[in-house]
Amino acid sequence: MDWRYRAACRDEDPELFFPIGSSGPALMQIEEAKAVCRVCPVRSQCETFGFGEYDGVWGGLSAAERRRANGADRVGPSAA
């Protein structure tokens, strides 16, 4: 079975995990998304998947946190 079927976020509004911006209300949204991730049984699989994504909260990590963990300025396809 695909790990996403067991994800704690499967019944949440997907927009929760894709905040617009990185300050003000977006910070509160990121923390709310991370709260869902904290209780997720497939968090590690989601985090691994998220390292291939540019936007969103995946496995409890924001896009900025994934970039820092990668030691890169951006995650995902390289800029053309």
Image (spheres, rainbow, N blue to C red):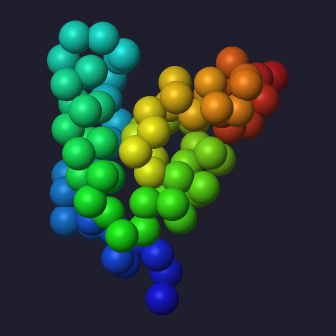
Where is residue 48 drawn, in percent x and y? 60, 55
Give the residue displayed 19% in from the left and 65% down from the top.
11
Q: In this view, does 20 lie above or below 17?
A: above
The quarter holding residue 33 reads top left
Outermost residue to the top:
24
Q: In this view, does 58 lie to the left or right of 14?
A: right
On the question of residue 16 being in view, the answer is: no
Q: In this view, does 49 lie above or below 1?
A: above
Where is residue 43 drawn, in percent x and y? 43, 60
- Identify which residue, 64 or 13, lies in the foreground: 64
Q: In this view, does 27 lie to the left or right of 64?
A: left
Give the residue displayed 30% in from the left and 11% down from the top.
23
Give the residue displayed 53% in from the left and 64% down from the top.
45
Where is residue 57 drawn, in percent x and y? 40, 41
Q: In this view, does 10 lie above or below 72?
A: below
- Identify which residue, 15 or 48, lies in the foreground: 48
Give the residue displayed 57% in from the left and 34% down from the top.
66
Query: In what quadrant of the picture does the C terminus appear?
Result: top right
The quarter holding residue 24 reads top left
Where is residue 18 drawn, in percent x and y? 35, 37
On the question of residue 57 being in view, the answer is: yes
Q: Is residue 51 left or right of residue 6?
A: right
- Identify which residue, 45 or 21, lies in the foreground: 45
Outermost residue to the bottom:
1
The quarter holding residue 53 reads top right
- Identify which residue, 28 or 12, lies in the foreground: 28
Q: Is residue 39 left or right of residue 58?
A: left
